[in-house]
Image (tube, coloured by chain):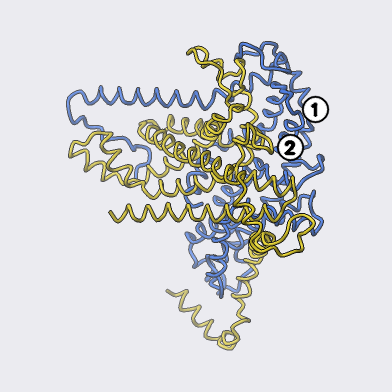
Amino acid sequence: MMVSENTQVITGQQTTAVRKKWLRSTDIAGWCFVLPLLVGVLGFSLYPMVSALLTSFRGNGAASAQWVGLTNYSRVLQDDLFWGALYNTIYIGGLSAILGIVFSFILASLVHHLPWQRTRNLFKAIFFLPNVVSAVATSLLFSLLFHPGKEGLINYALNWFGIDPVGWFTDPSIARLSVVFMILWSALGYNTIIFLAALQSVPREQYEAADIDGASALGKWRYITIPSLRPIFLFMIVMGVINGMKQFTNVWLIGGSAGNPSGALMTSVLYIYRNAFLSSQLGIATAASYLLFVFILLLTLVILKVNARNQLN
Amino acid sequence: MDKTAPSLPKAPIKLGHQTSRKFTSFAIMFILCAASVTMVLPFIWMVMTSFDWGARLNIPFPPSFWPEDPSLRTYRAALTNVDLIRYILNSFVVAIGVIVISLFSALLSGYALSKIRFKGAGMVLVLALSTMMIPFEMTMIPQYMLFNQIHLLDTYWVFFLPALNYAFGTFLCKQFIDGLPGELREAALIDGASEYGIFPRIYLPLCMPIFATMVILQFLGVWNELIWPLLALNNPDKYTIQLGLAMFNYNNGSRQMPSIIMAATCISLIPVLVLYMFLQKYIVESIATTGLKQ
């Protein structure tokens, strides 16, 4: 209280300064402190967004000075490759997000149930380990593990069960699923860690009350744990969708710029990359990136909406 | 709350409760161990294969965990074929620059948004938070064009300048500094300290936990990044470690060279694995506390 009274006295002496609003020293100091951030946000986030929008309305290659209206957008929307890429992206991103949430939640619940702190920490460390490994290293490793021949480790193991070698990254109908497996391996630990932190925040009183009522462990999990983690699930789904839509490094390393096999690994970002940097069709590429952005936004809104409706019921 | 004991109440409620609990614990351990093996086996295979001179051209059949022809020659071959040491040093230069610049920007802005109530602070915060939603993939093409125009492609400025825009860091710092008492600043102002001296002298030393978290997150992010180096760097002397590794694999085409590539991959992993080994607990904690805020 003393402090605030003192500051009032000081500001009282500075009434003349306060009247000239733009010269207040705290304002100047504040803006100086946020200047680096502002330069970054304006120069490397807002300016590129505007610039991309303008580019998407201009011609491609030599005609880049010409305004072409919505031509790029209609060309992208009529491009089968774009829709194929969007399908692959949703397939890989959606499936890896959903499976990732399910598996990591189960893992986190199991780890949470262990009574020994040290063992829990050990499991946390093991599950998170693949997460610090780069996408490049993961892709190189899995392209060998998922070798299509009988000498691939996974195929060799399957052979024990009498299963013929699978063309993990060479069979177009399986390649997407193989990428999902790879993403699960590398990303599962991240979600597990977050779920574990969330599990610790569920109030213990609820469990104790359920114990008195004689609830089983599974019953408590179903009726207390899962409902109280609802916001976390929602967050995970939204983040999973957004991250899933951005797959590039792994598919580029495995399938190259063509998204091989047979375009099964052509994702939206790969489509943008190809058009921008291989065929220098910047208008097409920026139009596609705006369409992708709008699509991600719509998807996020739908998820939030569905959740809001469910919460009302 | 007691963090170390999230288990159920100890008192046995009904007969045989102890044994059923033991069985559950055993079953849980079994599942978790199986999952752990799945997580770790690929690593073990990678390390073992990286020492197998017999796998320098093709994966030998049958595949095994023990090298057919254990040798360090694979590592020598990797180091002579790929300029790994240079790429690792390059990545360190990039990482240090990005960390210094992004933390400078994030700490200053986070402090100002939290403690200095200046005109327009709310607007700046909303602006920064809303740009967090924009995926990098949206802005990469215009950013490339921008750096092309100002002739900074193929220099590390392509990493350093955008590092100013670390809005997530700003958000983390603001939230952290919100938890520190504002009276420190007010008292210092009364004592005649200048607004510019208060942050470095009083608040910065208190910000060490969030400082360390951001260093870890940014280091892992920069170290593992591929797409932006791929676009912005053409000169192989400037390659970062991920780009160098990826281009080595890319230029090989259909030639496999499993053990050489695995050796190169292992070398590229050493810095992060060392970091993980020593800071494992801290890294996991950083993810647990910041992950939800992202």
Number of numbered discs overlaid on the protein picture: 2
Residue closest to the eye, B244 or B206:
B244
Crowding at dot 2, Cα within 10 Å, few <14 / some 14-19 / many 20+, comes out as many
Residue closest to the eye, A201 or A290:
A290
Q: Amino acid at mark 2?
A: Ile
Quadrant hosting residue A19: bottom right
**Which of the chains is yellow?**
A
Q: Amino acid at mark 1?
A: Asn
**Which of the chains is blue?**
B
Q: Residue at x 21, y 36 (%)?
A: A215
Tell me, yes or no, if residue B103 can be seen here: no
Q: Give the number of the disc on residue B88.
A: 2
**Chain designation of label 1:** B
Residue B70: image location, x then y, percent: 69, 13
B19 sits left or right of A33 in the view = left
Residue A14: image location, x then y, percent: 57, 85
> In the rendered structure, which disc, 1 or 2, sits on the residue that comes first in sequence?
1
- Mark 1 → mark 2, Cα distance in angstroms: 15 Å
Q: What residue is pinned by disc 1?
A: B81
* A204 to A264, vertically: above or below: below
User: Do the residues at pointers 1 and 2 share their chain?
Assistant: yes
Q: Give the number of the disc on residue A85.
A: none
Tell me, yes or no, if residue A57 can be seen here: yes
Residue A58: image location, x then y, percent: 71, 61
Under tag 1, what secondary structure? helix
